[in-house]
Amino acid sequence: MAILITGGAGYVGSHAVHALAACGYKLAVVDNLSTGFRAAVPEDVHFYEGDIRDRVFLDGVFAAEPVEGVIHFAASSQVGESMVHPLRYYDNNLGGTRVLLESMLAHGVKTIVFSSSAAVYGEPQQVPIRETDPTNPTNCYGETKLAMERMMHWAEAAHGLRYVALRYFNACGARMEGGIGEAHDPETHLIPLILQVANGQRPQIAVFGTDYPTPDGTCVRDYVHVDDLAQAHRLALEYLLHGGKSQCINLGSGSGFSVREMIDAVRRITGHAIPVSEQPRRAGDPAVLVASIEKAAAVLGWQPQCSDLEQVIASAWAWHRTHPNGYRE
Ligand code: UDP
């Protein structure tokens, strides 16, 4: 039996593919390569290039592969873009998930682990954020992730689907064994942008907002290593395959760092000065987002293993220094 991984050529997806392959799982990867890279998937993994909104294509994959469970990463994931093109996010994230669930159920596959996001919470009323806290997304991306969770909830009620929604905080870092890493075009995420400064690819890093109610005035986030996320997907899959019930689970490091602390850490690790340009706040950014990770420990037995700041930045630096243009030569 195989595990079908949608979006397996993307950033978190490709790290999960490598982690599951290393544990001996037989995998089939589906990706339309709109933002993912074929080179991020090991050569010997079955790869199907196509779009999950295409039912005929997906039915063909399920007919070719004896699938026992699905890990679903394929989705649009940029907050800013989701505010400019909200209907595209509904089409790709909700439309894609609907077709995927229909095709799964038609082939008798009823277990799915999928990427949700801390963006489902919106502005938190308390930190650390617990899974039982209110969900009030402040952007369209988070709204579609929450709607994906609800779609699975109703598919469970009607059809017996079981799911684990993994609500990631800030995914970061690169595979500790090397070979793959983060590659977005355009890049909008803090750590790769700071590392581009260290690499001489941009002159300075913009700090979005210095007047937040935090100790140094800049936003605090919970940065969790992508290899830790990958292991959590494996554990969630195994939990479901052993009969576990549906869950929504936070994945973070459990610690928060400010933008200035991240820049200082990159200075320390790369030895580069990293000039800073202080800018106004970016619309929609909450001041502090930090995960409670007690549920992931209790339900999945998951603990972050490589999410301390040094490991996150050193692994990301090793990748970006050797792949300044990502997967493009
Ligand atoms: N950020 C920043 N400068 C940048 C990019 C990001 O100051 O060039 C800040 C952003 O406002 C947020 C934090 O860094 O507080 C993390 O942003 P990122 O886009 O990496 O992830 P997000 O928290 O939006 O998921």
Image (cartoon, helix red, strand yellow):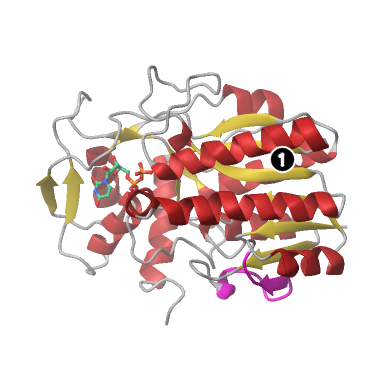
Whether residue 183 sits left or right of residue 229 in the image: it is left
Image location (x, y in percent) of residue 211: 14, 30
Position of the C terminus, as image quadrant, is bottom left
Q: Quadrant of residue 300?
A: top right
The local crowd at label 1, few if under 14, some if 14 to 19, many if 20 or more residues have their Cα within 10 Å, is some
Q: Which residues are magenta?
A: 38-51
- Say what secondary structure mark 1 lies in: helix
Residue at the location (37% across, 55% down)? Answer: 85
Return the residue nearer the eye: 238 or 321: 238
- Check the image and name the residue furthest to the bottom: 329
Which residue is identified by label 1?
235
Q: Residue at x 24, y 69 (%)?
A: 201
Based on the picture, tell me whether residue 33 belongs to the magenta stretch.
Answer: no
Question: Which amino acid, by three-letter code, is at mark 1?
Answer: Leu
Residue at image x 75%, y 51%?
Answer: 102
Which quadrant of the figure has residue 166? top right
Q: Position of residue 120 (x, y in %)?
A: 47, 34
Quadrant of res 286: top left
The one nearer the camera, 159 or 221, is 159
Residue 121 is left or right of residue 202, and the answer is right
Residue at 62%, 30% (x, y): give it. 248
Look at the image and tell me whether residue 267 can be seen: yes
Q: Is residue 121 above or below residue 316?
A: above
Q: Quadrant of ligand 1?
A: top left
